[in-house]
Image (cartoon, rainbow, N blue to C red):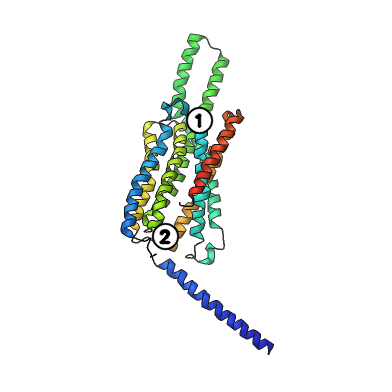
Amino acid sequence: MASITKIKAITISLILNLSFALPATALAQQQCDSASTGGCHDKAKSLQLKLIAIFSILIASVIGVCLPLFSRRIPALMPDRDLFVVVKAFASGVILATGYMHVLPDSFNALMSNCLPVNPWKKFPFTTFVAMLSAILTLMTDSFAMSYYKKHGINRKGGGVDGEKEKNGERGLGCVENGGLHVGHRDELNDGSNDRDSMLLRNRVVAQVLEIGIVVHSVVIGVSMGASSNQCTIRPLIAALCFHQLFEGMGLGGCILQAEYGMKTKAILVLFFSTTTPFGIVLGIGLSNVYSDRSPTALIVVGLLNASSAGLLNYMALVDLLAADFMGPKLQGSMRLQAWSYIAVLLGAGGMSVMAKWA
């Protein structure tokens, strides 16, 4: 009798569980397959907001990335001044928070979505795995690019940085002949020139790799906004992305400034950074009729791209920007400047973390 009662209890429990689970599963599938509806979803109004976003984000991006490039005209913002170091630390904190607080959580949300099958997406941490591989790949890119540029840029006569060094060397020889400098002094000058060339190449590699990481996640953000018809989401996102692009542009602009590129290369890097998010929005608008941010393919592609971008940005912010500056002779020689720089990093990272509520 007791066993029959137990069987009945188990049967009733199973029926109740199925009665709740099946509608929930069907509802989840319906949410994945169908477009969202509601008062916030208005294609006409959302299109107007997207057009505003294109121009607003473009202007904010141009201002952010160009501010450091024009800082040479302001003595206090020259790369060798303390204020420039503090501002760069603030921008590096912004980039660090972008990777940890914006891009990485977006990847988790996409790859852990209920619209994806449990196997394999919920049985393996793809987000952290791809982010780890991306960080290792960024290290490899840094290392191989430095080796390549040192071999082909410095060792070859008249090419790249070596051309500048050769010209400086010719001027140095002229000074030796006229001023009677000792050979030892000339060797010290050559060592200093080699150190400067190595640092210049390092800055150029950092600027290029950082630009790649920023461009990737900027396009993803733009496509997501352009394909959305939720005006309640788009409206606060415009303001958040404007601040995001402004401060992230300052970080990239500081790297471009220290790389000492020519005007043509600077213009290309500024153009790519400034137009990627607006281009992504335009692309998202064009794909809005066929693109669904809840389709399995879109979730997987966006999730993996965000994970790789997060790994790259986190590596660049910690290793190439923050560690390189804080372990450098300028900051190591001044505890006061270190303290101000750490405050700037915390302010940049904290401000960007707060904006994660909207973007």
Q: Which mark is residue 293?
A: 2
The quadrant in which residue 16 appears is bottom right
> Looking at the image, is 27 positioned above or below residue 153?
below
Q: Secondary structure at mark 2?
A: loop
Residue neighbourhood size for the residue with mark 1, other residues' Cα within 10 Å, grouped as few (<14), some (14–19), many (≥20): some
- Is residue 169 visible in the rendered image? The answer is yes
Whether residue 187 sits left or right of residue 74 in the image: it is right
Front residue of 289 and 263: 289
The residue positioned 56% from the left and 20% from the top of the image is 188
Residue found at the very far right of the displayed protein: 2
Q: Position of residue 282 (x, y in %)?
A: 34, 51
- Is residue 316 visible in the rendered image? The answer is no
The residue positioned 38% from the left and 58% from the top of the image is 230
Look at label 1 and name its amino acid.
Leu
Residue found at the very far front of the displayed protein: 39
Q: Position of residue 254 (x, y in %)?
A: 46, 35
Mark 1 to mark 2 CA distance (whole Å): 43 Å
Which residue is the site of mark 1?
83
Q: Which mark is residue 95?
A: none
Front residue of 61 and 309: 61
The quadrant in which residue 270 appears is top left
The quadrant in which residue 225 appears is bottom left
Q: If you read the primary sequence from the N terminus, does the residue marked by circle 1 or circle 2 appear first?
A: 1
- Could you tell me if the residues under marks 1 and 2 are in contact, i.e. CB atoms within 8 Å? no
> Looking at the image, is 99 positioned above or below residue 293?
above
Q: Position of residue 101 (x, y in %)?
A: 52, 50
Nearer the observer: mark 1 or 2; the answer is 1
Whether residue 286 sits left or right of residue 26 in the image: it is left
Look at label 2 and name its amino acid.
Asp
Which quadrant is home to the N terminus? bottom right
